[in-house]
Amino acid sequence: MKIESSTAFHQGGNASNERISTLHPDIIQSHILTRLDGPSLASLACASSKLHALSTEENLWRNICSSTWPSVNHPRIQEIISTFPSGHRSFFSDSFPFLDPQPSKLDVNSLTLPTELISAVDIYYQNKIIYSEVAETEASSTWFLCSPFRVDLLDPKDSAPTSIKYFGGNEEDTWLKHLEENLSLSWIVVDPTRKKAVNMSNRRAVSVQRHWLTGDVQLRFGMVMAGDERRGSARELVECGVVVTCGGKGGGETHVMEASMLMEDMEGKGLNGKDSLVILKENYEQFEKRKRERKEMKQRKERALDLIFITIGVAFFLTFWSAMLLR
């Protein structure tokens, strides 16, 4: 029994891979891979070449993207995703992680700015979708480049009803805290020309308060990024903020009244369209670079671990046979 246990231990992942490889590919795809979320599927694809081939199937990633972000089912988004290098798998890789930018010096003249931005927005309440919208923004006009950067999803006269019950009065503080903890947002910005996407929301609201004049509830989501000026200036860091405004009457339904994205510097001043596009593009490129470096570092660690295990196995083998020969 001890010999069998040692053999299984030293076989490591190879034994597991051999057992999995005996399953028919249809069984793996239909009964295993379809039950995984995006990060789990991506991790499984690294286990073996066979699993990698099965895990890159387009329908798997299409279903994952659709369930994670219902807005991507919009025909315009589907059309754009079809042009991505690996389809929905590339889109998920771009959109699932959030930006983690590092300050960098920007050269505006060297950047080719996008001419169009597509916003795919999903609002969730207790992890259930309550509102989805897709908006197209023309980003090459003089008006857009020179005006304060702002993307609006809803006309102030329109509203989207939700299943959330609206409270006020004595229960207001508790209700606002409840919204802060249970309302979440995904705002994916897609550049159809460069075939890239990035999620600009931090998922959870950073603040919830009532508007001093209208009384509507404003939930603010934000992401801080590197700016385009020297250290210590007002634009050393900038915030890409998303404001979701909700309204309603006590005891009735809560309505999403407005959802908008804007860019502000450290003094609260709005950035114009051109400056905002430059910062968005440069930070995304920094994000892509960091992601590649992280992947390469992970691969180096895995190779080092493989070498260590091989060395241990060889040492164990030599020690065992040396002991046998010296008897």
Image (cartoon, rainbow, N blue to C red):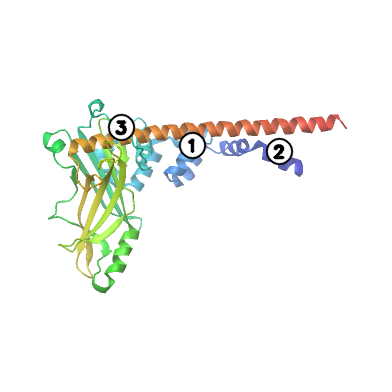
- Say what amino acid the circle numbered 1 marks: Ala
Q: Earlier in the sequence, mark 1 or mark 3?
A: 1
Give the CA separation, mark 1 to mark 3: 36 Å
Decide: marks 1, 2 in contact (CB < 8 A)?
no
Q: Residue furthest top?
A: 110
Quarter where residue 228 is shown: top left
Quarter where residue 258 is shown: bottom left
Residue on which disc 2 sits: 7
Q: What is the crowding at mark 2: few (fewer than 14 residues within 10 Å), some, or many (at least 20)? A: few
Q: What is the crowding at mark 1: few (fewer than 14 residues within 10 Å), some, or many (at least 20)? A: some
Secondary element at image label 1: loop
Secondary element at image label 3: loop
Give the CA separation, mark 3 to mark 2: 55 Å
Residue on which disc 3 sits: 105
Whether 35 is drawn above or below 312: the answer is below
- Say what amino acid the circle numbered 2 marks: Thr
**Number of the label disc, if any, that sits on residue 45:** 1
What percent of the width, then of the height, locates residue 116? 20, 35
- The answer to which of 217 and 20 lies nearer the viewer is 217
- The answer to which of 317 and 171 lies nearer the viewer is 171
- The answer to which of 189 and 280 lies nearer the viewer is 280
Q: Quadrant of the C terminus?
A: top right
Q: Quadrant of the N terminus?
A: top right
Q: Residue visible at 43% across and 46% down? A: 37
